[in-house]
Amino acid sequence: MNASAHTPHILVSGGGIAGNAVALQLLRSGHRVTVVERATAPRPGGQAVDLRGPSREVAERMGLMPGIRKYQLRELGMCYVDARGHEYAAMPMEMFDGKGPVAEIEITRGDLNQVLLDEVVSAGGELDYRYGQWIEALRQDEAGVDVTFADGRIERFDLVVGADGVHSATRRLAFGPEERFATYLGGYGAFFTIPTPAGVRPGWFAMRRVPGATVGIRPDGDPETAKAIITLRAAPNPALRRDISAQQRLIRDMLADAGWHAPAVLAAMATTPDFYFDELARIDMPTLAAGRVTLAGDAGYCGSPMTGMGTAMALVGAYILTGEVAATPADLPAALARYEEKVTPFLAEAKQMPGGGIRMMLPNTRVGASLARASVRIMMSRLLRPVMVKAFFSTTDGYELPSY
């Protein structure tokens, strides 16, 4: 039996949360790991993500909690405001026993990724981490995968893990075009860093709803800054992709009459260093393995930001994938089959769209927006809180996380 059967060399495409979680656990189990990330450096910032239920359990088992506590955001709850900034509904973090829109453990995506990167560095082992690099072609046989990189190098790996996001190039090369697996969910999302507006309630995620859109302001790690989070209900427009001017024009048009702090958000949008905009889409794969190529995180099972479960799926998926690979490193196809079997029940729950999807979340008429505002108040009542949890918030508490 050759050396690679004892010590597989595994390529991870993507240096985000899913990719770095996979790399960390593979290094800890003694594998040789190469990570390629198209960006030239780690990406800071990003919106707040939470840990709850199985994802928090994974973070604890992986030893990430000390680092997470270091960067943890001080979030007290979520509130809804009108055009003048008057609060008409509030959901403290404790109201839904940690199952609501704000959990006990909240951290920015960039900070969580840094926690993972710090652990990757300290894990030791055989690691080759390459920024500014990506996969251009894949050619595989029963024993491995020949990978052509952007710089022209061709190298062979025992396994390739695509963790390169919702628009995954690895998925396209191994499984087929994105259109086969992506479902447009009726809108777009954007987030970026802004100076904290005066008068924002400290520690609270404030949300303003207008016909067809929401604009939110969420606490950041630095009290001088905040995260703007925007959701738009709109018909699909392929011309928006990679056209930042058109993206920002659409946002300005839809939030022109939003009032509250919307003018400050729109002003900061023009100069923010981390503007992000993308369609709201779900990725559904018929299988997570194509020979010796598999997928993790948004590349394989994106439920869209509206589920609030993207980080949970990334961490849980990475944990199960690497646990199964470590269990049978000499039989990687069997490990991938077990990975898919064990993660699928979790994904089925985590990808559920809360509250009936974007049409219910973002009515596009003033009457609909007024009714949605009234329903929020009603749902805050103690009697209806259990109903709201089932209808509006994804829950995976019943999933039994495998142990490795």
Image: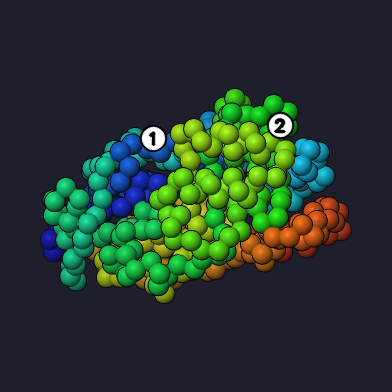
| Residue 388 position by quadrant | bottom right
Element type at marker 1? helix
Q: Which residue is mark 1?
A: 118
Q: Residue at x 17, y 70 (%)?
A: 141
Q: In the shown orientation, is residue 130 left or right of residue 309?
A: left
Task: Tell me whether the residue at label 1 lies in contact with that at label 2, contact meaning CB atoms closer than 8 angstroms.
Answer: no
- Disc 1/disc 2 C-alpha distance (Å): 33 Å
Q: Give the camera-side residue of 275 and 104.
A: 275
Q: Residues within 10 Å of mark 2 (few under 14, many from 20)?
A: some
Note whether 253 is above or below 140 in the view shown. Answer: above
Q: Give the camera-side residue of 293 and 5.
A: 293
Note whether 251 is above or below 168 in the view shown. Answer: above
The three-letter code of the residue at mark 2 reads: Val
Note whether 256 is above or below 355 in the view shown. Answer: above
Q: Where is residue 179 drawn, in percent x and y?
A: 40, 69
Q: Where is residue 364 drawn, in percent x and y?
A: 69, 60
Q: In the shown orientation, is residue 292 left or right of residue 209?
A: left
Q: In the shown orientation, is residue 189 left or right of residue 359?
A: left
Q: Residues within 10 Å of mark 1 (few under 14, many from 20)?
A: some
| Residue 319 position by quadrant | bottom left
Q: Earlier in the sequence, mark 1 or mark 2?
A: 1
Q: Residue furthest bottom?
A: 286
Is residue 50 among what the camera can see? no
Q: What mark, if any, has residue 200 been given in the picture? A: 2
Q: Residue at x 77, y 37 (%)?
A: 85
The three-letter code of the residue at mark 1 reads: Asp
Tell me which colouring the rendered structure shows.
rainbow
Q: Residue at x 75, y 45 (%)?
A: 80
Q: Give the camera-side residue of 51 and 84.
A: 84
Quadrant placement of the C terminus: bottom left
Is residue 373 among what the camera can see? yes
Q: Residue at x 73, y 28 (%)?
A: 199
